[in-house]
Amino acid sequence: MKIVLIGFMGSGKSRIGRQLAARLGWTHHDTDDMISKQVGIPVGDIIRQKGEAAFREVEKNAVSLVSLSDRSVISTGGGVPLNPSNMSELSKDAMIIWLKVSPETALKRAGNIKSRPLIDPNDPIGSIRKRMAERNPIYERAAQHTIESDNMESDHVVDKIMTLIPGRA
Ligand code: S3P
């Protein structure tokens, strides 16, 4: 069984994934961390230096690898659900949870936008709104559960996810 967290940049997938895995005593995998370890530079630099298409290829390989794991929590990069084959691999014996946030929360939590090549530094909130409007229907279709986590502490989000896992409430 796997718990797969999807959602926009800054939705808390990495932090919540780490906390949830610790709570369950399961392994935590973070596709962005795997990729940056493998390539040796941060994911933002990979996109900037090699282009988004090249990054998506490496990301696909990371997804295939973590899809084989069991008793694991997987924090995905925000673009993982854009490729349907990623989601069909990740969905096997898995619960997919969308951490939904507003554009304002995404911007607040995204950290240094210089490290985020997919956010336009001249119009951060506008570019987030646009990309989020394109992606939300994809996240919605891919997920079995949605947690609106704008005003929720990460602990509380983890509590809520625990109630969704059979036998773990
Ligand atoms: C991306 C999100 C990032 C990272 C890359 C592309 C995206 O991950 O994978 O910069 O397309 O939304 P986080 O969602 O973990 O920030």
Image (tube, grey):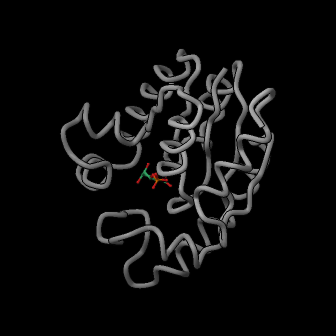
Q: Nearer the viewer, residue 116 or 71?
A: 71
On the rendered structure, is 120 left or right of 3? left
Residue at screen point 60% across, 64% down: 153
User: Residue 7 location in percent, x, y?
Assistant: 61, 53
On the rendered structure, is 137 left or right of 131? right
Residue 31: name its quadrant: top left
116 up-or-down from 23: above or below: below
Q: Nearer the viewer, residue 54 or 115?
A: 115
Count of numbered circles in the view: 0
Residue at screen point 26% across, 49% down: 42
65 up-or-down from 160: above or below: above
Residue at the outermost left position: 40
User: Residue 148 location in percent, x, y?
Assistant: 73, 62
Q: Nearer the viewer, residue 28 or 123?
A: 28
User: Residue 56 location in percent, x, y?
Assistant: 44, 39
4 up-or-down from 70: above or below: below
Q: Quadrant of the C terminus?
A: top right
Residue at screen point 71% across, 19% down: 93
Residue at screen point 20% across, 45% down: 41
On the rendered structure, is 165 left or right of 130? right
Residue 23: name its quadrant: top right
Q: Nearer the viewer, residue 26 or 78?
A: 26
Residue at the outermost bottom position: 122
User: Residue 137 location in percent, x, y?
Assistant: 76, 55
Q: Quadrant of the N terminus?
A: top right
